[in-house]
Amino acid sequence: MRLQCQNCKADIQYENINIQENICYCISCEEAFQISKLLDAESIVHYDKPKDTDVIYIEDNHSMGFQIQPKGFKQAMFLFIFSLFWNGISWSMLGFSLKDERWDIVAFLSIFCLIGLFVGTLTLFHFVGKFTYMMNSATAFLKWSIGPLNYTKKIAVRDITNVHEAVIYEENDQPVYGLSIACGKNNSYKFGSNLDAEERNWLRGEILAFLNERCPDFRRLKN
Ligand SMILES: [Zn+2]
């Protein structure tokens, strides 16, 4: 979550924001504010689209949406080409040694073939996991998909109370951040664990701007 101070326009740091208590604190002017009072259209910091992002973003007069590519798309391309070569060579050599009944070589090559299958599976996984967000003035659609399998969550825009940065999971005791669409205090929908900080700020700003400008139903966080 990113907020700007009402008085001095300084960014209020994450550690000085308490969403549960609806309070934040500006270290520059040493004053506390209710978060809800800062959450109007003017306080939203707009971020430009990061130059090297893989996120596909679209917007027109009635809707906005984006698609987050699977984690490490560029690495997946490399893995894909690598696994094609690896599998091609390993399996054809295995075929020849089976034909010649060279069982010692077959045993040796089968390890290479197993590694090939493992890398191939890994590649497939990297290629297929996607997240799609679509929103019009009344409804937001969140879709998580792995290949042909997908799960879609439909949220009424009037139920959305906030969009903020959130911890998705922990990796080696380090928090991995993503975005969270909050609907009241108890419901939230998280996504984007592979977004970097720049991408999170950008997408959060775009969602909030759309909610504020195009969604009369959007109910702001209030006491
Ligand atoms: Zn201030």
Image (cartoon, rainbow, N blue to C red):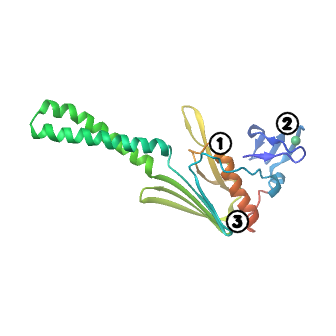
Q: Residue 139's spot in the image, x, y percent? A: 63, 67
Q: Does 132 sit left or right of 31 as displayed?
A: left
Three-letter code, disc 3? Arg
Mark 3 and mark 1 lie on one chain; the one further toward the N terminus is: 3
Q: Which residue is mark 1?
A: 197
Left or right: 184 as drawn, with respect to 117: right
Q: Residue at x 14, y 30 (%)?
A: 104
For residue 27, the mark is: 2
Indicate the secondary structure of the residue bearing disc 3: helix
52 w.r.t. 56: above or below:
above
Give 104 or 96, whichever is nearer the viewer.
96
For the C terminus, the quadrant is: bottom right
Q: Residue at x 80, y 49 (%)?
A: 35
Mark closer to the observer (2, 1): 1
Number of the label disc, if any, that sits on residue 158: 3
Tell me if residue 145 comes above or below residue 200 in the rendering.
below
Q: Earlier in the sequence, mark 2 or mark 1?
A: 2
Secondary structure beneath dot 1 equals: helix
Q: Amino acid at mark 1?
A: Ala
Task: In the rendered structure, find residue 223 and report the number of the disc placed on it.
Answer: none
Cβ of mark 2 under 8 A from ligand 1: yes
